[in-house]
Image: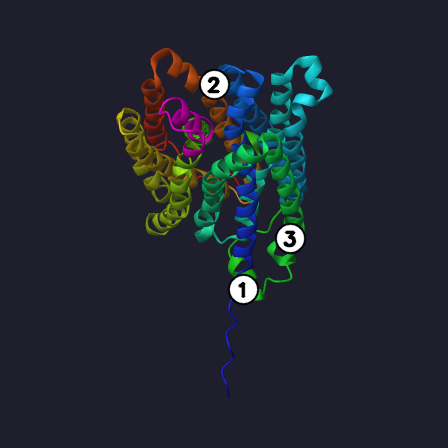
Amino acid sequence: MQAAVEIQPTRVRWRIAGLLLIVVTLTFIDRFNMNVAAKYIQQEFGLTNLQIGSLLSAFVLGYAVLQTPGGWLGDRLGARIVLLVSIVWWSVFTALTAWAPNLPLAQWIGIPAAFWLVRFAIGLGEAPALPNVNKILGRWMTPGERARGNSLILAGVGVGGTFTPPAIAWIMTNWGWRLSFVACGALGLLIAALWHWNSTERPEDHPGVNAAELSLITTGRPKAKKLPTPWARMFRGANLPALMLSNFLVGYVMYIFYTWFFLYLVNVRHFAVMSGSYWSTAPFVAILIAAPLGGHFSDLMLLRFGHPWGRRIPVLACTVLCGLLIISGSRIDNPYAAIVLFALAAGSNCVTAVSQWTLPNDISEHHAGSLAGVLNTTTNLGGALSPVLTPYIAARWGWIAAFDVAAGLMVVVFALWFLIHPERRID
């Protein structure tokens, strides 16, 4: 009698992860396009560095405001549909950026304020994205694949940051900054349609998932339930507060690369605009490489040591490394060597973020969206402070001092992780 042929699991979960990588990349394209456009907008409308810093922070403030409500909505209404609405919202306002100076609103409150409000609205639209991406990945990936799956979120930072500055600079040089925002908005609506037609809320609802893959994903996992969010239990003890502060500090350092690195190269290291746009992608190339490597390393350490050290070891190593690289990069005279050191620092920061971003699904199956929203709120509050405080410190004490502050914050993250225990679940 012929032995039954074992059915191999399909790999639809990785197709879903690939779609989410595209979505996350779009979020960072629409976040970074203003970093390049800021120079052109500053010249055209005579904005000060402080006004530009405020404009860069507007997105992050809106982004921080709806993180927790956006994650909670995903827990209650379904992460897939919330993500779809989010993509459409921010894509429309991204395109609207091109007309911000000409809106009737600009005549009443001024052009800088009109830009600020449109960017704030884009941040509100993007806010639910990452908490719900995190929840979808937690639902679709096996526990041993979570860090690798979530590393795609940070890989999206790398892809968006690598290709956006030169692409946007090229469009702006040839056709002006307005067309770049229209093109980004149209791309977003196309990706929204792609997500709508190729995704489902749960693995069991997807026609391409076979029984073997479904068993692989769901074995040992509690059945999804819509339970009241245990806010009081979340904040009991030092675990979540320490993780929130760690996210805040990592976000502060991360947003120096997101917002000021291009202008630092052009204004401080004296690169030409196009040259600076290319070299400013170096940290994001490092992030693109470090994200999957960090995810693999985090999952490997988890299998080897379990909680809490499996998630803790990559963070402890990379926080110290990041701080040392930032200190070295800010002091070295050779601008190209400085770029390499800063890029490696960004990659080290990314590995820390990968482990932190995995924790909502480690801590809770049912409330991962709400947890991710809380944590990403603090990440982006740090990110909102960074674009304003960094140039202030640089103007008062110099850029080396501004980078020293960032390095010191990574040492604080190192200490905080001795208080963080991913094994203390809230379900």
Observer able to see residue 228: no
**In the rendering, at what x and y percent does residue 147 appear?**
44, 47
Q: Secondary structure at mark 3?
A: loop
Q: CA distance from mark 3 to mark 1?
A: 15 Å
Q: Nearer the viewer, mark 1 or mark 2?
A: 2
Residues marked 3 and 1 touching at CB (< 8 Å):
no
Q: Which mark is residue 197?
A: none
Residue 265 falls within the magenta-colored stretch: yes
Q: Is residue 26 above or below residue 395?
A: below
Q: Earlier in the sequence, mark 3 or mark 1?
A: 1
Q: CA distance from mark 1 to mark 2?
A: 48 Å
Q: Which residue is mark 1?
A: 10
In front here: 229 or 4?
Answer: 4
Residue 18 falls within the magenta-colored stretch: no
Q: Which residue is mark 3?
A: 200
Q: Nearer the viewer, mark 3 or mark 2?
A: 2
- The range drawn in magenta is 257-275
Q: Which residue is mark 2?
A: 388
Q: Is residue 334 above or below residue 9?
A: above
Residue drawn where x is 57% and y is 31% of the image: 231
Q: Is residue 197 left or right of residue 417?
A: right
| Residue type at the position of mark 3 | Thr
